[in-house]
Image: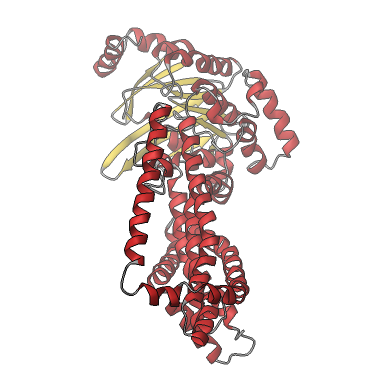
Amino acid sequence: MSVGSNGHALRVDGIRKSFGALEVLRGIDLDVREHEVVCLIGASGSGKSTFLRCINLLEEVDAGRIFIEGEEITAGGVDVNRIRQRIGIVFQAFNLFPHMSVLRNVTLGPVEALGMSRTQAEAAADELLGRFGLLDKRDDYPDRLSGGQQQRVAIVRALAMRPDVMLLDEVTSALDPELVAEVLNVIRELASSGMTMVIATHEMGFARDIANRVCFLDGGVILEQGPPDRIFSSPEHERTRRFLQSIIDAGRM
Amino acid sequence: MSASGPPGPEDTELVPGQGDRRSRILGRPNRPDRPRAEGRRAVLIAVASTIVFLAVAVVVIVNSAGWPQVKQSFFNGTQFRESLPDIARAFLVNVRLFVIAEAFILVLALFVAVLRSLPGPVFFPIRVMAVVYTDLFRGIPTVLVVYTLGFGVPALQLEGVPTSPFFWAVVSLVLVYTAYVAEVYRAGIESVHPSQLAAARSLGLSRWKAMRFVILPQAIRRVVPPLLNDFIGLQKDTALVASIGVVEAFRQAQIDSAATFNFTPFLAAAMLFVLVTIPLARFTDWLILRGRRRREMGGVG
């Protein structure tokens, strides 16, 4: 923790983002403490993914500021590569590199971005792969793996950078139902090891289970936030109630 | 669908309609579950119809009024045997031309393609230059480039600038084909799904490293068949440098033919070109087929 972060791993201050005429984020504020797990819920198109991509600087914000450990990352002239090394992101569609073995997927960042030696990076990768039950897959190519295995490799790839914060963007949405659990278990383990995480998810049971705080995004703003028990059992806003009702109606909670 | 991402442009065939050649030639859809006997019957029909077609063509040509003269001037066995060694020796010049040129083309075209895909307003002038270059050299007929450079530059009599026609022949072919091949590479780069770049950049890799380790390896693998296709084109176009006095196979055939008033040397030259290009064409088809099979096998997990 650096000086001036006040225990905040991540601080987001009024960020806005438009794509053409479409305003996707309309002023989002969010403070995430170290070791905190924040789940973002909300309908498709509510801005969850865009929000995470903005934090990772994959999208440029139109207004507002973002701080990681007290350092502003939206300021002009910051080294985006150095910032991204501190923020791991896992995508819905895994986005593994199909032309590289699992091991190479995991070591590419540490070797090429962090300048780690290959031996060192591979030792660290083996340890992580072992921890998540993937060591026997280290020499396989992504297309030989199941979706669940691929997503676990993607999580390991992000972890290998030893990030301060992990952003998970609907990481189970592209998976067959029977593969969801293995990925969620990995995230549970991460949470229990104290990793700071911001998780966009449609898995309400999981969010209730793992989150310290749940944020309901609607129309590009955080409409309501609080401990999962309160959000799920007595939401204040009508829109939050309707969203949760639609999830219950769909049999997904 | 590819296993590592959503269905996207990466799954599109870069060379349409060049798939399973055998099934296309045999005129039946590619259905692996087709019973064996039926497959054998299709082959028999194909063979029979080919034989009939060729027989009819031969009969028509041989019985045409001008055949004796044509046979004498294009299919003269003695003439063929006499000129073939000369032309084969000259053909080595073509081989040297296309091997040297291709080596430069593959590297320079990749460079142009990467320049053209640089993002942001800062690189606008570089992108414009790349676009102007590719437009220009794809638009000018190769023979005009060969002529202009081959005769024009040596005529300037500049100190230290080579005057050898061979040198300017290589330069011309490199200029023209780099423009084509750059476009092939660019298509490959653009066929790699943007999520791959996002994933690479999210690890903190610079744009250049993301290009080098993630985008280009996938892009190049996908464009190998069209690259080989352009290589075949280059091999044939080496004949164009005859126009500035490089004695290669075509020029040698012209010389022989002028001495004997017989066109058989051209046939010998044509045969040599075909001998080189056909194996490459088959190899290209095989690569495309293999790529398709791999795609079909992938993504089961």
**Residue under the image location 51 percent in, 66 percent down:** B271
Kindly give the residue lying farthest to the right in the view shown.
A119
Position of residue B9 in the picture relative to residue B115 (left or right): left
- Judge whether B250 appears above or below B274 on screen: below
- On the question of residue B108 being in view, the answer is yes
- On the question of residue A6 being in view, the answer is no
Quarter holding the C terminus of chain A is top left
Q: Quadrant of residue A149?
A: top right
Q: Colour mode?
A: secondary structure
**Residue under the image location 70 percent in, 29 percent down:** A124
- Judge whether A78 appears above or below A53 on screen: below
Quarter holding the N terminus of chain A is top right
- Front position in the image: B171 or A176: B171
Q: Give percent across and percent down for residue B43.
A: 41, 39
Q: In which quarter of the image is residue A250?
A: top left
Q: Give percent across and percent down for residue A17.
A: 35, 40
- Judge whether B151 appears above or below A149 on screen: below
- Front position in the image: B57 or B281: B57
Q: Give percent across and percent down for residue A16.
A: 35, 39
**Residue under the image location 51 percent in, 31 percent down:** A89
Q: Give percent across and percent down for residue B111.
A: 54, 61
- Judge whether B241 appears above or below A3 on screen: below
Position of residue A16 in the picture relative to residue A246 (left or right): right
Q: How many labels does the image show?
A: 0
Q: In which quarter of the image is residue B108?
A: bottom right
